[in-house]
Image (cartoon, rainbow, N blue to C red):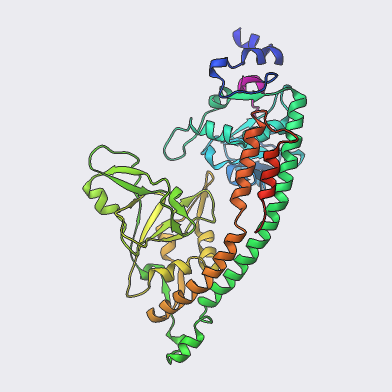
Amino acid sequence: MARAKKESLTQRELLAQALVPEVEQPYGVPGNWVWVRGSGCLLPMTQKRPTGDTFRYIDIDAINNKDQSVSVPKELSVSLAPSRASREVKEGDTLFSMVRPYLKNIAYIDAGLADCIASTGFFVCRPSTNMKSLYLYYLMISGYMVDGLNAYMKGDNSPSIRQENIYNFAFPLPPLPEQHRIVERVESLFEKLGRAKELVQAALDSVDTRKAAILHKAFTGELTAKWREENGMGLESWEKKSFAKCVLNMQNGISKRRGSDGVSTVVLRLANIDGNNISTHDLREVVLDNNEIKRYSLTTNDALIIRVNGSYENVGKLIHIKSNNNWAFCDHLIKCRFDTAEVITPFMIYLSLANPYRKFVEENMVSSAGQNTISQKSLEKFSFECPTLPEQQEIVRILDSLLEKEQRAHELCDVLDKIDQMKKAILARAFRGKLGTNDPSEKQQSQRVSCG
């Protein structure tokens, strides 16, 4: 009886019931705004099962989490429909992945996607009459929502949130005309940042093209042709080798996140990987016992390989351990110790940047629930043409010199992260009611986007 009564309530009544008490409101908003639970501004999700011969399916792998959009829905036979294919989507909905929400697998459903069916791994955010669909979308991709919902994650293998976490979450809700103005302002600013990002990306692509050409010459022998001639050697001195032949051992990292008996030890995480280097910012420590320290310790000239990551571009990346800091490493990473009779570590680091290695990793990684993984067994099968140790040293010497110049050029235009930070700042201001049409801070942010 109570359920029937609840379903008969008007949107205004549901909104009134879902208002957030003042003491529980996350931050101050303008006086004509209200704070409301998700249950008061979101419509219930609906189910839909595939029919006919084929259907279009949106799972987490179909989301581009760089720009929060659906890349390409999967065309599946109805007879092969997965059991998770049951979320109905409509134009104006926003999909929000409940699995690892920090990966931001979020997307807006436009008219071209309205016939799709989504995975139950998504919460389908469908606005009620008191909320505009694009206002809801921009709110769901904001740091306030993503970071706030991350706090409710539970589970080790696939940490997730629950539907109730979103229904009970506090949503800032301005009047409809104000929502419309916020959307217009956000899209105007995002459009300007998008144009700046395209210019920066073009400059970076030019640098990356030159870098790829240099690496190609290095690992086909062209870069050191003169050196071989001076040393009375030819390309026949190069030997086909497998990754397995060059490695003494590989080992996945420790999954331990806390301990009480042992020594407090730095355990490197994905957050400590900066390009192909280690960042010492925000190092975390875990108490490890003597056996764990011995098993998971890193020494000079070891390499770390990113085993699992939400971005496929990072999977398989090699990082050179250049000093012995008595650090350990987490289970998202693989420790690789090379046989110095076969290869030198800096040579292998550069090899991992070249197209053949990157292509091999992309073809052999496994993707699931928004995570991409490469295994030790797969890596062992990678093969490459390998020069002698002296020529490896010469290749590294030349690349150090050439790519240092490329890196300087790269850094001149390295503002992509700043643009993403500006977008986050714009959304943060938008949902606090501080995104004014003549806000000087917005102009300052736009002026800071440049290539030089």
Coordinates of residue 146 in the picture (x, y in percent): 56, 35
Q: Is residue 36 above or below residue 410?
A: above
Coordinates of residue 90 in the picture (x, y in percent): 72, 33
Res 298 quadrant in image = bottom left
Q: Is residue 49 visible?
A: no
Q: Is residue 335 above or below residue 149?
A: below
Q: How many marks?
A: 0
Res 191 quadrant in image = top right
Res 200 quadrant in image = bottom right
Residue at left offset 32%, top offset 39%? 258
Q: Is residue 178 visible?
A: yes
Coordinates of residue 260 in the picture (x, y in percent): 26, 37
Q: Quadrant of the C terminus?
A: bottom right
Residue placed most toward the observer, 252 or 4: 252
Image: magenta residue range: 34-49
Coordinates of residue 201 in the picture (x, y in percent): 66, 58
Q: Quadrant of the N terminus?
A: top right
Q: Is residue 286 left or right of residue 400?
A: left
Q: Is residue 43 magenta?
A: yes
Q: Is residue 340 magenta?
A: no
Q: Is residue 255 left or right of residue 165?
A: left
Residue at left offset 67%, top offset 32%? 430
Residue at left offset 28%, top offset 38%? 259
Residue placed most toward the observer, 255 or 37: 37
